[in-house]
């Protein structure tokens, strides 16, 4: 992550980030409980709007306060890329990369339209789209870092054996234990599926290094930092489901996510 940040600051991706200003900043907290589930998902996001793009980074409860937003609007992305908060830096990085190359214009991005419908219908469609990026034999152990129950089911439907890991959940909808120590699931894994939330909590680099060292497939599903994760395609990330803001859970209408493969063959 530090290397990517330095490349952006050095102008490696074209226009320098000081040419982009942050118009708006959003502190967002939402909860979700799907029907039939006893799990309430609690998510926090920092969103930065710059031009026609949004940058997003998730964070843990209490890590940032809403009044921070007043100090972020109007600043250049260059200054926010140097902010003391890693969450702010990643949201700014995401906003910059989303502007210089929007997902809708990126070579290799395949749009997937999520259907109009209930939260359950849309979550299942989204997580099937993620699981379809897995190319593993039946019975392969899949470390799932960042647990949502429809994705557990989708990995199982693909023949994988989910190894769930999450900071905030202790069991899946079906009573399977969820560890909060990713080292346990990475040690057993034949493949890894990781949430973009790992960008914000500082674990992404470790996951990336592990998958590179073990030559494991790494699929990232990202609302948080979707353009940031894209920068690692072919450099440890083998496939990506990128879902820029506004995220699917905020609409009942048809929305689009973008799938990438490092090797599109």
Image: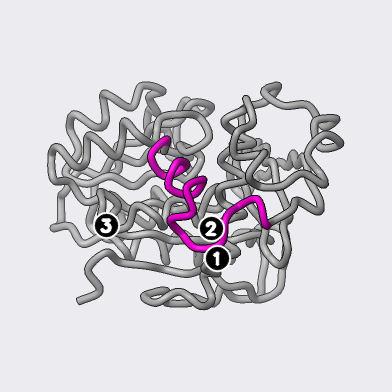
Name the residue tied to disc 2.
97
Kind of element beneath mark 1 = helix
The image position of residue 164, as x and y in percent, is 36, 36
Q: Nearer the viewer, residue 147 or 260?
A: 260
The image position of residue 137, as x and y in percent, is 13, 58
Q: State which region is magenta.
A: 2-19
Residue 81 in view, yes or no = yes
Name the residue tied to disc 1.
100
**Badge 1 density bin: few <14, some 14–19, many ≥20, Cα 10 Å:** some
Name the residue tied to disc 3.
238
Q: Main secondary structure of the magenta part?
A: helix
Vertical placement of 134 versus 144: above or below? below
**Badge 3 density bin: few <14, some 14–19, many ≥20, Cα 10 Å:** many
Vertical placement of 99 versus 170: above or below? below
First of labels 3, 2 by sequence position: 2
Q: Is residue 193 left or right of residue 109?
A: left
Q: Nearer the viewer, residue 258 or 6?
A: 6
Residue at image point 47% right, 69% down: 258
Q: Nearer the viewer, residue 43 or 100?
A: 100
Q: Nearer the viewer, residue 37 or 242?
A: 242
Alpha carbon distance from label 1 to label 2: 5 Å
Labelled pair 1, 2 in contact (Cβ < 8 Å): yes
Q: Is residue 16 magenta?
A: yes
The image position of residue 63, as x and y in percent, is 67, 23
**Badge 2 density bin: few <14, some 14–19, many ≥20, Cα 10 Å:** many
């Amino acid at each position: 992550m530090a290397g990517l940040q330095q490349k952006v600051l050095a102008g490696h991706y074209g226009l320098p980030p000081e040419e982009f200003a942050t118009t708006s900043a959003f502190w967002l907290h939402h909860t979700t409980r799907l029907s039939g589930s006893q799990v309430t998902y609690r998510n926090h996001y920092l969103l930065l709007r710059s031009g026609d793009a949004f940058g997003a980074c998730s964070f843990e409860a209490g890590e940032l306060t809403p009044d921070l937003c007043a100090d972020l609007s109007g600043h250049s992305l260059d200054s926010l890329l140097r902010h003391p908060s890693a969450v702010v830096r990643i949201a700014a990085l995401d906003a910059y990369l989303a502007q210089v190359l929007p997902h809708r214009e990126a070579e290799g991005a395949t749009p997937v339209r999520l259907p109009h419908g209930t939260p359950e219908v849309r979550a299942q469609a989204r997580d099937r789209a993620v699981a379809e990026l897995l190319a593993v034999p039946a019975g392969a152990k899949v470390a799932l870092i960042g647990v949502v129950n429809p994705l557990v089911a989708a990995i199982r439907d693909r023949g994988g054996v989910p190894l769930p890991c999450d900071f905030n959940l202790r069991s899946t909808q079906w009573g399977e234990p969820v560890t909060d120590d990713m080292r346990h699931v990475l040690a057993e894994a034949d493949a890894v599926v990781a949430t973009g939330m790992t960008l914000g909590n500082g674990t992404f680099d470790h996951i990336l290094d592990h998958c590179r060292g073990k030559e494991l497939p790494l699929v990232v599903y990202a609302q948080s930092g979707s353009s940031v994760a894209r920068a690692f395609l072919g450099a440890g990330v083998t496939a990506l489901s990128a879902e820029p803001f506004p995220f699917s859970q905020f609409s009942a209408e048809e929305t689009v996510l973008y799938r990438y493969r490092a090797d599109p063959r």
